[in-house]
Amino acid sequence: MQCPITRCAATDRRSLDRSLLPRLTRGLAWCLILLTLSSCSATQFIYNRVDILVRWYLDDYVSLDREQQALFDVRLEALLDWHRREELPAYVVLLDDALTILNEGVPLDDTRVMADRIEEAAIRFQDPFLELLLSTGEDLSADQRQEFVNVLLSKQEEFEEDRLARSDAEYREDLEARFEKQLSRYLGSLTAEQTNRVTAGVAEMTRLDRFWLEDRRVWIAELSLILLDAQPDWPDHVRALIAGRDDALLPAYREGIDHNGEVILQLSRDVLIARTDKQDRKLRNRLQSLRDDLAALAMPNVETVNP
């Protein structure tokens, strides 16, 4: 979830570089989840227009004709309707519980449970989103499938050129900046104590971008064979490929993910515990505002007044 308790302790808990689903599927899915959970006064405005943003994202990978776009829009509308009815009420409950965790001093066990619940919410969204993409893929021509593969390979080369060129020091500087930006969005300017805690935590983390890129290149090669061969049961092969992603991870990659997840959870909790009175007020106001926005979006399933 897009807040210090949840995003830093849950979304990034598995890895800042890892993808549980292929990048396209994960990117489109989180496009909705992260925009939904972006704590700002524009939450409702953005959520009600997320279908446009998803189309823009998809356009980066494949060009749909008018008929294909119309079919995609109908399927996407059904998915968003499900998300509003079934998932938004659960997000409201999670935010209520996040505020309770703050009241209780951010207990470690409760923070771990919250992180797991947020990850479960993401997993619930991934399966129906994958089915949306697979149904769209069945409408593609051979040329469009080739276009999609070409874009994947091109983006892979861009990622490798950009990320592998970083030194270890630059890698950690990037992570520090991302943490500080995210935490500052909810807390305001960090204190010297909080900034030092982020720096110390990032220094403990294992560098994972090389593992992620290697894993992604292997996946793209396997997916490309499935898509370009285009056997009648190709969607089942894609489902099997995705289902086996976790088991296919290198042991060192898996260990790094687990290690970094624990480091991230601990440093995020420590920063929250060290918050000032001013930061506490800002954090609570943002979480409460987000909670009320999501409750309004989920109506009539959820009341807009905090219980």
Image: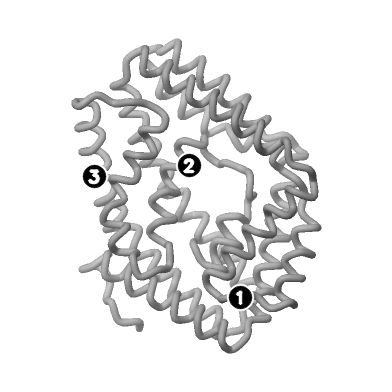
Distance from the alpha carbon under mark 2 to that under mark 1: 31 Å
For label 3, the crowd category at 10 Å Cα-Cα, with few meaning under 14, some 14 to 19 and many 20 or more, is few
The answer to whether 59 appears left or right of 19 in the picture is left
Q: What residue is shown at x 53% (from left), y 27% (from top)?
A: 241
The amino acid beneath tag 3 is Ala
Front-lying residue, 205 or 166: 166
Query: Is tag 3's residue or tag 2's residue first in the polypeptide sequence?
Result: 2
The numbered dot on residue 26 is 2
Q: Are marks 1 and 3 in contact (CB under 8 Å)?
A: no
- Which quarter of the figure is the C terminus placed in? bottom left
Q: Which residue is mark 1?
A: 189
CA separation in Å, label 1 and label 3: 41 Å
**x and y percentages locating residue 294 in the rendered image:** 33, 67
Q: Amino acid at mark 2?
A: Arg
Q: 121 or 219, which lies in front?
A: 219
Return the x and y of residue 291 as percentages of the image width and height.
38, 73
Residue 31, percent from left and from top: 42, 48
Say above or below: 56 vs 92.
above
Total number of numbered discs in the rendering: 3
Q: Position of 217 compared to 64: left or right?
A: right
> Is 223 above or below relative to 301?
above
* Rendered residue at 55%/23% (across/down): 153
Q: Is residue 51 left or right of residue 61?
A: left
- Residue drawn at point x = 57 percent, y = 62 percent: 115
Q: Answer few, some or many: residues within 10 Å of disc 2's Cα (few below 14, many 20 plus, some between 14 and 19).
A: some
Quarter residue 221 falls in: top right
- The label on residue 78 is 3
Q: Could you say which is closer to the camera, residue 27 or residue 249?
A: 27
Residue 82 vs 98, above or below: the answer is: above
Secondary structure beneath dot 2 equals: helix
Residue 7, disc: none
Q: Comparing marks 3 and 2, which lies closer to the viewer?
A: 2
